[in-house]
Amino acid sequence: MLILNGSVMVPGGDPHAPRRLDLRIEGNLIVEVAETGTLHPAPGVAVIDAGGKLVVPGFVNAHHHSYDMLAKGLLEDMPFDVWALHAQPAYFGPRSRAELRVRTLLGALENLKCGVTTLQDFCSLVPQDDETIDTILGAYREIGIRTAFSIAVRDVAALDIAPFVPTGAPPGVLELIQGAPGRARDELDYVERQIARLRPLPPRLSWILSPAGPQRASFELLAGLGDLSARLRIPVISHVYETKAQTAKARQAYPEHGGSLIRRMQGAGLFAHRAFLAHMIWLLPDEIELLAELGGGVIHNPLANLKLKNGIAPLRRLREAGVPIALGCDNSSCSDAQNIFQAMKMLCLLAAGIDPEPTGLLAVNAFAAATTGGARALGLEEQVGKIAPGMQADLALLDLSNIAYLPMNSAVRQMIYSDTGSSVDTVIVAGEVVLQHGVSTKIDEAALRAELADIMGRFRADFDAVAGRNRAAIPYLLEANRRVQEMDVGAWRYLCQCRRE
């Protein structure tokens, strides 16, 4: 394949006025980046005329949950733990193979339509069986997106806020909040068995190891995952310091680690290979320095952080400490869009909104977080995230006739601040065109919409049942949330300086 005459974002190039270049792709790899007009098609070679297009490395959504794609638009104005009671797969039980496939395809398609060529699916499997995982991975292969897949594991079932729930809650409410604990060995055995069963993974698929959170796992489970990561050289991604309640719990529950979730993970060996931590809002300055020393990174999820009332990550301090940053779009029930353009823009705006001084967090940094940063988080930096010979041919072509780029003053700034993703025209993964003129070349989108309509009746009925069952617990969770907000955990991560008016 030849891609000719595009404005190409290459490493070291001018991000505001990218040069017009030609790309030669052989198989799944970029093999040549050349001056426009120097590459000529041979018989049988596909040619894409990229004149009037901005050619960028495919974006990386480093934090996605396929399991709640069907809950888009159903929840709002809920603190984190109230939301969790409505969104976690354990509350819904096993789902049909048709639903598993459709929700996975839907999430992947939305990502592709926003120029994402690689996503990390942090997936809670209910039940943990071969058929469930095979259905999900089969859907990813069907649609052609690159996927770093993880099985979220935990053996502490209680909601993070459980220690702060007031006394007097009815038994049924406590049962919902506490859940049923699991066994660390069972979780570890399942993950290791799946890795062995599916070895080698098909092209475009890779593994990530994911404790649901260091506060949701016993030390035995965390240490087991740390050992597995070191032995198999598989990166770790976990939710960490997403909420103030998680932070308050850490201060009380882990005195042997100084009340620190980072030190708890360090003690379990989870930084032995590579670890990126999602959210990271409520960490302290000394933990930022420790994270940098350990070589860990952060996956910033600005939309979900705001919608779930969790606060704003200390982006400037993380950057100044040299902590690498990736970007994620998170759950569709708490960000409502798998749109990396929204996440890139919000990274810059949040940094500006909490600091009256220049922060150095610019459009180029947001672009890097969504490309090279995400690739590094997933252990794929030698394959994706930049346009260069030897890299996978994962590309997105953005239409420069889109209103976002008129007039053209800065490609990267207008990509971040003006574009909504509506410019995405063509997406290529591993040298294969998987989206052409905004439409999937791999699946029948009309058929997917019909299948979605068929399963939504059952899903909505089940969702309504879960919401009805949870209603009695909400007042207790809100009171627990108020108690947590009055606690001093050493950090304050809201825009408002007052605790409560």
Image (cartoon, rainbow, N blue to C red):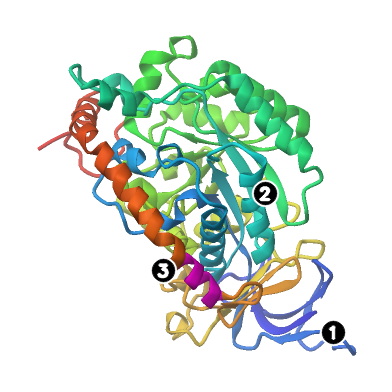
Q: Earlier in the sequence, mark 3 or mark 2?
A: 2
> Few, some or many C-alpha atoms within 10 Å of disc 2 (few <14, some 14-19, many ≥20)?
some
Q: Is residue 330 positioned above or below 478 on the image? A: below
In three-dimensional space, the C-alpha distance between marks 1 and 2, rounded to whole angstroms, equals: 35 Å
Furthest toward the right, the residue is 43
Q: Is residue 27 positioned above or below 99 on the image? A: below
Residue 224 drawn at (x, y percent): 65, 22
239 vs 66, nearest the viewer = 66
State the quadrant of the C terminus: top left
Q: Which labelled disc corresponds to residue 45?
A: 1
Residue 281 drawn at (x, y percent): 40, 37
User: Which region shows up in magenta?
Assistant: 445-452
Q: Kindly check if marks 3 and 2 are in contact, taking CB atoms under 8 A apart as contact.
A: no
Furthest toward the left, the residue is 501
What kind of secondary structure does the magenta stretch mostly adopt? helix
Image-based side of 378 in relation to 152, left or right: right
Q: Identify the element where label 1 is drawn.
A: loop
Residue at horizontal 77 percent and vertical 28 percent from the top:
231
Residue at horizontal 65 percent and vertical 26 percent from the top:
188
Q: Identify the element where label 2 is drawn.
A: helix
Q: Which labelled disc corresponds to residue 194?
A: none
> Which residue lies under the disc numbered 3?
417
Instruction: Tell me the amino acid under the disc marked 3.
Output: Tyr
Residue at horizontal 58 percent and vertical 20 percent from the top:
184
Depth check, mark 3 against mark 2: the one in front is 2
Q: Earlier in the sequence, mark 3 or mark 1?
A: 1
